[in-house]
Structures are given as C-alpha cells and as structure tokens.
Image (cartoon, helix red, strand yellow):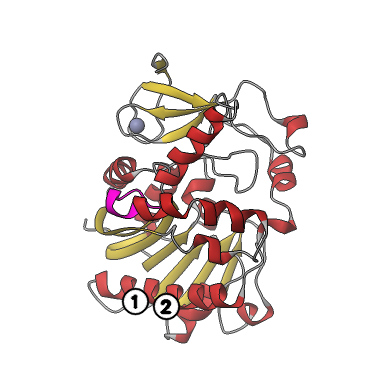
C-alpha cells in the first residue's frame, strides 16, 4: 500500500488520496501529455481522478477525440440501446412529480435520445460540444445548442428533466456540472445519468493482470489520455457524495452490465476475446455488486 498523499478531492473536498498508477497514454497523445500525471483515489469518498489537474487546450482535446469516437454497433446491440433509451426516459417520467414537458440531453451525440423524447411529445433540447446529429435529429423541431452546458445559459428551473449519459466521466469537474444541472431543473424535476463503476470487479481483475504482466506501475482505472478518455471515476460512495454536494436526491441507483459485454463486439476481435475470457469475472461481479456501470435517477427537491 502506498503512502497517502495530499491532493484535494473535487467531489468531497477531502485531502488524502492514494496513488493508483500512471495513466495509459495513446501514441497520438504522448507528444502533449505531461509525464507526471497520476491516477489517484480519494480515501474519504473513493472518487478517482488525475493529479496534477489536467490542463489540455481545446485543440489537444479535439486531437484526442477524433471521428472514430463512435464505435461500430452490431445490429442486436443497436436494438438493445434503442430499448434502453426508451425505458431510461420512462424512468424520468416515473420519478418526476408531474408530466415531463421540457427535456434536455447533455452530450446528445447523434441525437437518438432527442428523437425518442420528441416522439413522446416532449419539447427536446440538446447540447453538445460537437455536432454529430443525424439528418433525422436535425429536424423534428428539436433545439440544438453547440457548446457546453455552461455556455448554453438556460434560465433557472427551465427543465422538467435532464438526461446525461456517459458525460460525467469525461469532465474534470463533474460536481460543477451537476450543480449547473440542479440550477436549470425545476423543483421536482429529475436527472437521469449513466457512468462507469470505477470499482468494478473487471477493473480489479485488470489491475491484477497489469501487476502479473510486469506493468504494475500503470493504472487500470480511468483512461484519461487514451480511448475512452475517462478523467473522472465514480464509485457507489462517490456518486452518493456528489449528488449530496450538488443538492440532488438519489431516487434510483442501478448497477449493471458486464456479462453480455463480449457479445457487443464483432466475433474474434480483441475486445470480443477480452470480455469472453473475463466472463467469470463479470458473472462473479453480480453477487458482489461490482458490475461495470451505474445508472442513476436523481431529483431536485428544493
Ligand atoms: Zn472525495
């Protein structure tokens, strides 16, 4: 066990962290990424982050996130994602205290969720730093703002519901983003978001494999400078802490995924084999409540 170090946790403000390891860096990122970055974990809330604070220019981030960011999907997986989007929006309605009318998708990507919201008669707004909307999502009366959520400057309490899937793990200050979401939600309004579980058994197993293969100095948690570019790592306890600090109440928490992961990829490709061989780990993670992802519904109650 390494000695605790002093760094302020961006979620709970705690000052004691332990070093997890050096982040992996892709070849295209290597020329502009500092060599002294470390992945650390807050001892108080188990939030994973990078020290020193990441400072990359907009241009450097864009070089990291190329056009290849959206992965190819097998047909059954695309269909599963479509069904998932439908019940995720069902959740928003179930946990809202009245009918959802105004809906925002933060990090809306291709715009599939916006189309699902619009099909329910909701007034749909999307925000994203780059415009990857499909032709269909550009129509249908959907509002789109290019930029980040802060630049969009929505009025206080403007939305009944906010959706933010696979976003918080990509931002260096997720608490500020959650506070901004709270500001633009009306009282009784609801937020849905999904994040990876950094404490997953799969990550534990990968870290063990790194050690066994002589790469123990590398961190298997977070991947800030290589796809999938995760800079903030949530766990069960840091998720709860983040919501409390943002002034939101957890209405529902689901820990899921892993055992079907191998079927997501084209047969006999590297990720297919990796997840197939890891199948026992994914199955063991179920009773241990250490599966790959979290989905959360949170409500603004004040
Ligand atoms: Zn913390």
Residue drawn at x 31%, y 64% is 190
Residue 40 forms part of the magenta stretch: no
Please identify the quarter of the rendering in which residue 22 is found: top right
Q: Which residues are magenta?
A: 285-292
Q: Nearer the viewer, residue 74 or 159?
A: 74
Left or right: 132 in relation to 209: right
Q: Nearer the viewer, residue 194 or 60?
A: 194
* Mark number displayed over residue 86: 2
Report if residue 248 is visible in the image.
no
Name the element at disc 2.
Answer: helix
Count of all numbered marks drawn on residues in the image: 2
Please identify the quarter of the rendering in which residue 9 is found: top left
Quadrant of ligand 1: it is: top left
Name the element at disc 1.
Answer: helix
Report if residue 85 is visible in the image.
yes
In the picture of the structure, the residue carrying the numbered disc 1 is: 90
Q: Position of residue 116 (x, y in %)?
A: 48, 80
Determine the CA span between mark 2 and mark 1: 6 Å
Q: Residue furthest top?
A: 3
Q: Position of residue 204 (x, y in %)?
A: 43, 38
Residue drawn at x 62%, y 20% is 36
Q: Is mark 2 within 8 Å of ligand 1?
A: no
Q: Position of residue 163 (x, y in %)?
A: 43, 64
Q: Quadrant of the N terminus?
A: top left
Residue drawn at x 51%, y 39% is 206
């Amino acid at each position: 066990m390494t000695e605790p170090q002093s760094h302020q946790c961006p979620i709970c403000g705690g000052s004691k962290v332990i070093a997890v390891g050096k982040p992996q860096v892709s070849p295209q990122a290597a020329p502009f990424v500092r060599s002294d970055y470390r992945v650390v974990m807050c001892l108080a809330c188990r939030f994973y982050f990078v020290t020193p604070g990441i400072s990359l220019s907009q241009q450097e981030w864009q070089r990291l996130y190329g056009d290849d960011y959206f992965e190819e999907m097998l047909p059954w997986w695309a269909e599963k994602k479509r069904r998932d989007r439908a019940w995720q929006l069902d959740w928003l309605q179930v946990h809202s205290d009245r009918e959802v009318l105004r809906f925002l998708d933060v990090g809306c990507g291709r715009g599939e969720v916006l189309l699902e919201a619009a099909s329910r008669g909701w007034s749909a707004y999307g925000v994203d730093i780059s415009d990857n909307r499909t032709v269909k999502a550009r129509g249908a009366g959907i509002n789109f703002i290019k930029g980040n959520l802060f630049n969009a400057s929505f009025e206080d309490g403007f939305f009944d519901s906010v959706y933010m899937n696979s976003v918080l793990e990509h931002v260096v200050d997720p608490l500020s983003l959650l506070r901004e979401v709270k500001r633009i939600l009306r009282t009784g309004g609801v937020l849905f978001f999904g994040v990876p579980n950094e404490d997953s058994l799969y990550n534990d197993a990968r870290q063990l494999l790194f050690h066994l293969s002589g790469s123990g100095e590398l961190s298997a948690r977070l991947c800030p400078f290589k796809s999938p570019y995760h800079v903030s790592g949530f766990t069960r306890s840091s998720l709860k802490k983040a919501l409390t600090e943002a002034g939101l109440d957890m209405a529902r928490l689901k820990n899921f995924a892993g055992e079907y992961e191998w079927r997501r990829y084209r047969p006999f490709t590297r990720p297919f084999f990796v997840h197939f061989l890891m199948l026992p780990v994914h199955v063991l993670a179920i009773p241990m409540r250490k599966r790959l992802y979290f989905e959360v519904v949170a409500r603004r109650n004040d």
